[in-house]
Amino acid sequence: MYWGELISLAVAALWTMSALAAEVATKRMGVMVLNVWRMTLAFLLCAVLLWVTTGQPLPFNAGWQAWGWLLLSGFVGYFLGDWCLFNSYIVIGSRFGQLFMTLAPAFTAFFAWTMIGQTLSWHALLAMFVTIAGIGIAVTDSRGAEEGHPVRLKGVLLGIGAALGQGLGLVMSKIGLDHYSANLPTGELNEMANLLPFGSNLIRCIAGAICYSAWMFIARRTKHGETRWPTFFGAMKDRVAVRALVITLLSGPFLGVALSLAALQFTAAGIASTIMAMTPVLILLPSHWIFKQPITLRAVIGAFISCIGVSLFFLL
C-alpha cells in the first residue's frame, strides 16, 4: 500500500486550502500577527491532543537529539520558510507564490542525499521530473496572474527562499522524527506510532512561535507607525480574518504539517515533497472562483501532465 504517497496527496489538498486562506489572512492581519497566532494555536492544539492521548502535554520522551533537530527544523521551515512564503503571497499572490514551491522537491532531494544519504530510483526521478514539469507549465502562464499582483523580483526571491526553507526543514524533520522513534521503547513506539508526527510538530511549533513573537517584539512598530501588539489582539475582531486564520491553522501547521511528517515515515523525502508540490495545480480552480484568476489551456495541459507524473509514483 502506498501510504506515504496517499498521505502526501492529502497534504497537497490541505496546503491548497491553507494557501488560499493565508492570502486572505495576511492581507487583513499582516504576516507577523498571523504567524504568531498560527504557531501559538497550533502548539496548543497539539499539546491538548498529546495530553488527552498520552497524559503528557509535551513529548518529553522524544530525547534531546530529536528536540534539537525539530526545533531547528521549526526555525528553518516555520519561521524562515513560511515568512518568505507568506510575504510572497502579498507581493505576487498565493498562486504564483506556490509556483516557486515547486522547487521544494529538488531542495528536499538534495538535502536528503547530502544529509542522510537518501537516494531515489530512476523511476522516482522520472516521476519527479514529469510532475514538476507539469506544475511549472500550469502556473507560469502570465495570463493567469492575479490582478494587482504582477510577478516581481522581490516576490521571486521570497518564493525561492520559501522553497529552500521547506526542503531543508522537511529533511531536518525527518532526522528529528527518526531520533524520536529511536528513543522510544518498542512497546511505547507501537502505541504512539500515530502520534509521533503531532509530537514532532509540537516541537517545531515551539520554535516557530518563539521566533515570530521575538521578531514582532523587536519590530514593534508597523510601517504605519502603530505598535504591533494592539494590532495582534485587535486582529481577532475581524471575523473574516479569524475565519481565514482557523482554516490556515487546521489545514496548515496542525493537520497538514503533521501529515507531511507522517508521510516521511512511509516514503522517501523527495517523493513526498514532489507529491505535496501538487498544490499549485490544485489551487487553479479555487483561485479562479475566489480571486477571479483565469484558467488557461496551458494551465489545464500542465495540470494533466502533473497528474500523469504523480501516477507514475504508483505505477512504476
Image (tube, rainbow, N blue to C red):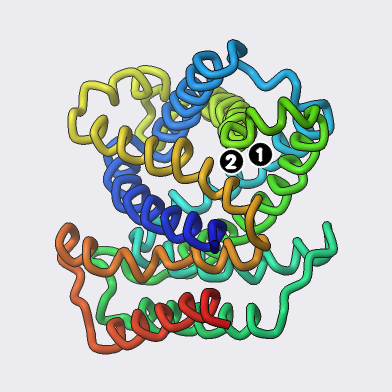
Query: In this figure, which residue is indicated by the disc labeled 2?
Result: 79
Location of the N terminus (image quadrant): bottom right
Q: Secondary structure at mark 2?
A: helix
Depicted 7 relative to depicted 59: above or below: below
CA–CA distance in space, label 2 to label 1:
5 Å
Which residue: 77% across, 46% down?
175
Position of 308 with respect to 197 (left or right) is left
Q: Quadrant of residue 301?
A: bottom left
Please name whichever residue, 286 or 265, is drawn nearer the observer in this view of the structure.
265
Say whether residue 82 is visible: yes
Which residue: 71% across, 31% down?
189
Query: In this figure, which residue is indicated by the disc labeled 1?
Result: 75
Please name whichever residue, 211 or 282, is drawn nearer the observer in this view of the structure.
282
Circle 2 packing at 10 Å, graded few (<14), some (14-19), many (20+), is many
Q: Secondary structure at mark 1?
A: helix
Which residue: 55% across, 68% down?
274
As drawn, the label of residue 89 is: none
Pointer 2 with pointer 1, Cβ within 8 A: yes
Position of 229 with respect to 113 (left or right) is left
Q: Position of residue 268 (x, y in %)?
A: 67, 63
Position of 87 with respect to 70 (left or right) is left
Depicted 255 relative to depicted 210: above or below: below
Please name whichever residue, 224 or 179, is drawn nearer the observer in this view of the structure.
179
Location of the C terminus (image quadrant): bottom right
Task: Tell me the kind of residue under disc 1.
Answer: Phe
Which residue: 68% across, 42% down?
73
Position of 199 with respect to 9 (left or right) is right
Task: Tell me the kind of residue under disc 2.
Answer: Phe
Q: Position of residue 249 (x, y in %)?
A: 39, 35
